[in-house]
Amino acid sequence: MNSREGYAMSRQKKSSGTLGSRDAKKELFDGFASVAKVMSSGRRAEIVDILAQGERPVDEISHEIRQSIANTSQHLQLLLRAGLLKSRRDGTRIYYSLSGSAVSRLWAAVRDVAVEHLAELEELATSYLGDRSSLTTMTRSELRERMDDGDLMLIDVRPEAEFRAGHIAGASSVTIKELETRLDQLPNDRLIVAYCRGPYCVYADNAVRILTRQGMKAARLEDGFPEWKEAGLPVEASNTHASGV
């Protein structure tokens, strides 16, 4: 039995309302709100943001959100029971992924509404990302056009596991941790475009700063891999070691 079926059975047992009654409506809307409630934790929002990149095991998720395995597992179980995640076992490891593309769209909507209506979000974003005013950005449509022309290099600066799970077609993996040691492998005569997890991912910003300090032409994609994939643009996955440049 999956998490959605379990939730439905528990609601049926609790339901005391009759057709069209106030109690029945209350329980229905409580069911809707339960999804929003489980997203009320910043750590669980982080988990959804990470899993929007692709499937990950518990230990890697724990490392990414800087939480213990036990705390991470509790967050994952809440998301699983709400139907936002699915899981599978491979030997001794349990892997989690989003239950569908609607979950990624839900997270994007929550994020965008917060940015539009919470004044303090801009200050919080600046504290995390730094001053972005000097960074060159590129839209998805601009990137697609420039890639067709072949006059730029696209680098994925996310962790290698995320690149292997899925990446923009034609991108090379150069994680932010290894970027400075691989500068001599990057072209000086072409624009380098970096992308990562989304509009509030610091990896691409830092990559552009590193590259421009070296006198290289660099820009960041204005959002990230999930938005590119959701738009139906070309993606690919790799089950082997991430490619070099």
Image: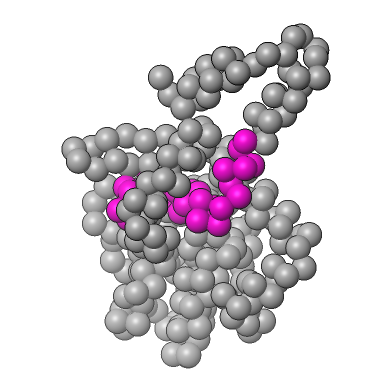
Percent x, y of residue 228: 55, 52
Would residue 91 appear left or right of 101 to someone viewing this image?
A: left
Q: Quadrant of the N terminus?
A: top left
**Vertical position of residue 63 compared to residue 180: above or below:** above
Which colouring convention does the figure follow? one colour
Main SS, magenta residues: helix
Q: Farthest residue toward the left? A: 91
Q: Nearer the viewer, residue 68 or 152?
A: 68
Q: Nearer the viewer, residue 34 or 239?
A: 34
Is 35 magenta? The answer is yes
Is 58 magenta? The answer is yes
Q: Residue at the location (66% across, 50% down)?
A: 110
**Vertical position of residue 229 compared to residue 199: above or below:** above
Q: Residue at the location (39% across, 79% down)?
A: 187
Q: Nearer the viewer, residue 35 or 113?
A: 35
**Vertical position of residue 159 compared to residue 226: above or below:** below
Could you tell me if residue 11 is visible in this image?
yes
Percent x, y of residue 48: 50, 49
Would residue 143 appear left or right of 67 to someone viewing this image?
A: right
Percent x, y of residue 40: 61, 50
Q: Nearer the viewer, residue 222 or 130?
A: 130
Over which residues does the magenta segment extend? 34-60
Percent x, y of residue 8: 55, 20
Q: Residue at the location (68% across, 30% down)?
A: 30
Could you tell me if residue 49 is visible in this image?
no
**Vertical position of residue 138 compared to residue 164: above or below:** below
